[in-house]
């Protein structure tokens, strides 16, 4: 006869009750669901005046929850505002590359179609040599801005072809827009970083409080804690 003896469960195997009260299963990791659970907990806590955490009041938790929700909104708004500006910067980069193709023809023509003379003049217009022997503006936008401002525009203003189609009239307005957009996107990037930092700090504290709430409810309602957790907003099946 086959031995059908079952192996005893490991002492470390969680029981259904343990699984339910595990904060890792009850507290969302994603920002949106976490903010919603925090909001529900703050509302429930405001109604249950008996509930107490000695190191965090309901009012402080509600403020923390509001700050976290606000930081999420700020981060999304800043990122959304940055998108069309980034697209425009790429368009200007493409226009610079096209304008540069014509500008190099102007310089080559003015140099008597002498490649050596032309190549010698290109760095004076802010162009850097590439491994394949060609010349171009830096791919780093900050360096590209400096090259346009300090080298290309001044050199172009003095060149005999400054008044031609791809002369100063082409480069100056695009440079001005490029400079403005870079300033705005740098500021937005800083805003996003600041929002992320604020969000992460609030998120860490928020999860710490929620974990304490879970354990406190389990301790106060040993027989009905599952229902209490749901009434306070902890619904693991939703995330």
Image (cartoon, rainbow, N blue to C red):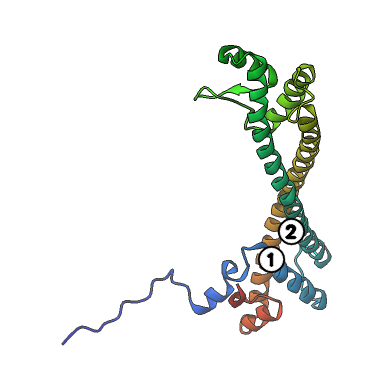
**Which is more N-terminal, label 1 or label 2?**
1
Counting from the top left corner in percent of width and height, residue 112 is at: 63, 13
Compare residues 84 and 6 and report the one nearer the observer.
84
* Crowd tier of the residue under label 1, counting other residues whose Cα lies within 10 Å: few below 14, some 14–19, many 20 or above: few
Residue placed at 77% from the left, 23% from the top?
A: 153
Say which residue appears at 65% left-offset and 83% top-offset.
Answer: 227
**Element at badge 2?**
helix
Please report the residue visible at 79 percent of the width from the left and 25 percent of the height from the top.
Answer: 163
Q: Quadrant of residue 236?
A: bottom right
Which quadrant is home to the N terminus?
bottom left
The label shown at residue 72 is 2
Q: Nearer the viewer, residue 182 or 56?
A: 182
Residue 172 placement: quadrant: top right
Q: Which residue occupies 71% across, 48% down?
A: 197
Q: Label 1: state its secondary structure.
A: helix
Q: Which residue is mark 1?
A: 32
User: Are the two marked residues, 2 and 1, in contact with CB atoms closer than 8 angstroms?
Assistant: yes
Q: Quadrant of residue 96?
A: top right
Q: Quadrant of the C terminus?
A: bottom right
In x, y percent, where is residue 178?
A: 76, 37
Is residue 162 shown above or below 228?
above
Work out whether 14 lies above or below 55. Answer: below
Left or right placement of residue 197 versus residue 133 in this view: right
Q: Position of residue 141 (x, y in %)?
A: 68, 34
Image coordinates for residue 77, horizontal then vertical, percent? 77, 56
The label on residue 45 is: none
């Amino acid at each position: 006869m086959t031995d059908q003896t079952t192996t005893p469960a490991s002492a470390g195997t969680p029981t259904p009750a343990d699984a339910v009260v595990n904060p890792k299963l009850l507290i969302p990791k994603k920002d949106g669901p976490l903010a919603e659970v925090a909001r529900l907990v703050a509302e429930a806590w405001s109604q249950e005046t008996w509930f107490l955490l000695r190191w965090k009041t309901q009012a402080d938790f509600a403020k923390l929850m509001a700050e976290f929700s606000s930081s999420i909104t700020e981060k999304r708004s800043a990122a959304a505002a940055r998108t069309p500006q980034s697209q425009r910067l790429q368009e200007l980069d493409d226009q610079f590359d096209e304008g540069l193709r014509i500008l190099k023809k102007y310089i080559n023509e003015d140099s008597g179609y002498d490649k050596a003379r032309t190549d010698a003049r290109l760095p004076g217009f802010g162009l850097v040599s590439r491994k394949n022997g060609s010349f171009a503006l830096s791919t780093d936008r900050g360096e590209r801005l400096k090259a346009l401002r300090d080298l290309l525009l001044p050199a172009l203003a003095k060149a005999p072809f400054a008044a031609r189609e791809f002369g100063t009239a082409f480069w100056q307005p695009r440079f001005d827009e490029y400079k403005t957009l870079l300033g705005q996107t740098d500021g937005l990037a800083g805003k996003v970083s600041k929002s992320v930092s604020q969000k992460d700090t609030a998120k860490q504290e928020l999860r710490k409080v929620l974990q304490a709430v879970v354990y406190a409810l389990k301790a106060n309602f040993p027989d009905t804690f599952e229902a209490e957790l749901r009434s306070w907003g902890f619904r693991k099946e939703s995330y």
